[in-house]
Every structure is written in C-alpha cells, then in structure tokens.
Amino acid sequence: QVTLWESGPALVMPTQTLTLTCTFSGFSLSSSGMCVSWIRQPPGKALEWLALIHWDDDKFYSASLRTRLTISKDTSKNQVVLTMTNMDPVDTATYYCARVDGSSWTVDYWGQGTLVTVSS
Amino acid sequence: QTVVTQEPSLTVSPGGTVTLTCASSTGAVTSGYYPNWLQQKPGQAPRALISNTSHRHSWTPARFSGSLLGGKAALTLSGVQPEDEAEYFCLLYYGGSWVFGGGTNLTVL
C-alpha cells in the first residue's frame, strides 16, 4: 500500500525559507524508475508543478521557480525534502507530493497536502 | 513559457457523455507528452484517473477513458454519474518538467 504525507510549517513569514518533507511508504526511491514530485495549489486556483527527483538523484524544477527551489531525498528515511526560499504571500498554497513512475511517466499516488500560509 | 489549455467549464446531464480536452502551446499533444488526468473534488487532494494517455489506474471506473483527439489529449466520460461532478486537470510531460492545465470544472446537471 503506497502512502505519502506532507509535513511542514503551517505559517511562514515573508522572506523566510520554507522546508517541506514528504514521507512515504509502500515503495522505495532507490528502485529504478521511481520519482517523487512536488506540486502546489493556491486557494481556488489550479495545480502548479514545482519539482521532481529521480531514483538516481536527477532533479528537475519549474522554470519559473528554479532559482528558489531545492529538492533532495533521504532514501534511508523514505523522505523527500523541498525547500523554497524568499517566501511571499503569493506562495500561500496547499503543497502536495506525489509518486511518479518514471518508466511510464505515471503520476499515481498523492499525499493529502499541507496548507502553507505566508503572512507577517 | 509553455501553456496547457483546458475548457474552463463543461456541463453534462446524468447518463450522458462528455469529452474534456488538453492542448499544448508547443503544438500537437502526442503520446510522448505522457498525458495524465486527475480528478479533484472540493476540499480533497487530486486523485489520479488516467496516465500515459489512456492507462486507467486500478481504481478508475471504466466509464473514464483517455485518448488523443485532434492534436489534443482527451478525457471522455461515458454514462456520467452525479459523483463525477469535480474539477479535472491534465498534466503533460515536457522532457523533464511537467505542466498542468488550468482545469475543467465539470457540472453534472
């Protein structure tokens, strides 16, 4: 049974750095083809793809947010971490992580999401 | 900047058939974009429906089908049920990065 869950602060001050953790079970990120992606959704708006990390540590980022994002993994802990620097109120959103099977580029299992509000 | 376009809203009658489409600003959508379709109901996380153009997940009802249609990715719902009222998002792969469509709000009325 594959599950993912996101954790991190609910409130972040403007200009601060956000650190989110995706903890998963039911699969291994050391298995060939496995990937984990981060996605966000501002209230009432569409989904936005942020970043993806491959089993071999290859990393990809949204072009518009590339300079602010870092994705990393800890295979032994079954965790993927996303950091986003210089947070702004427009970054207020629910942040999701999802599993991606890189052998077929299938996005299948999603976490429940964590709401992050950026406010002073 | 790549833009993926979906119909903002569609309405369908219960038992009817509706097709949602997903277009890319870069040109025709092909299987190489590995189209994924997701369903999202209010207050819930997205749920994967279709991957790799037409592959249903084990939990996806058979009334949902994916295809390529006229240079776009398409999601067809046949025999629509009231519980299919939701937001539907497509997701396209661009060789390392991904882009979501703006979503289609499907009303069953």
Image (tube, coloured by chain):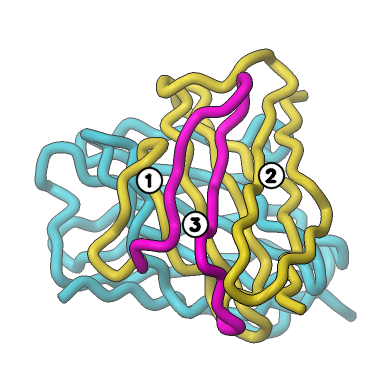
Chain colours: A cyan, B yellow
Q: Which residue is mark 2?
A: B101
Within the image, what quadrant is residue B31 found in?
Answer: top left
User: Which of these two is toward me, A101 or B20?
Assistant: B20
How far apart in space, not on screen, are marks 1 and 3 (Cα)? 25 Å
Q: What chain does mark 3 sit on?
A: A
Give percent across and percent down for residue B13: 71, 72
| Dots 1 and 2 on the same chain | yes
Which three-letter amino acid code belongs to the residue tagged 2? Gly
Q: Which residues are magenta?
A: B61-83
Quadrant of image for the N terminus of chain A: bottom left
Q: Which residue is mark 1?
A: B51
Asked whether residue B43 is drawn in magenta, I would say: no
Helix, strand or loop at label 2? It is loop
Helix, strand or loop at label 3? It is strand
Q: Which residue is mark 3?
A: A82
| First along the sequence among labels 1 and 2 | 1
User: Which of these two is toward me, A14 or B75?
Assistant: B75
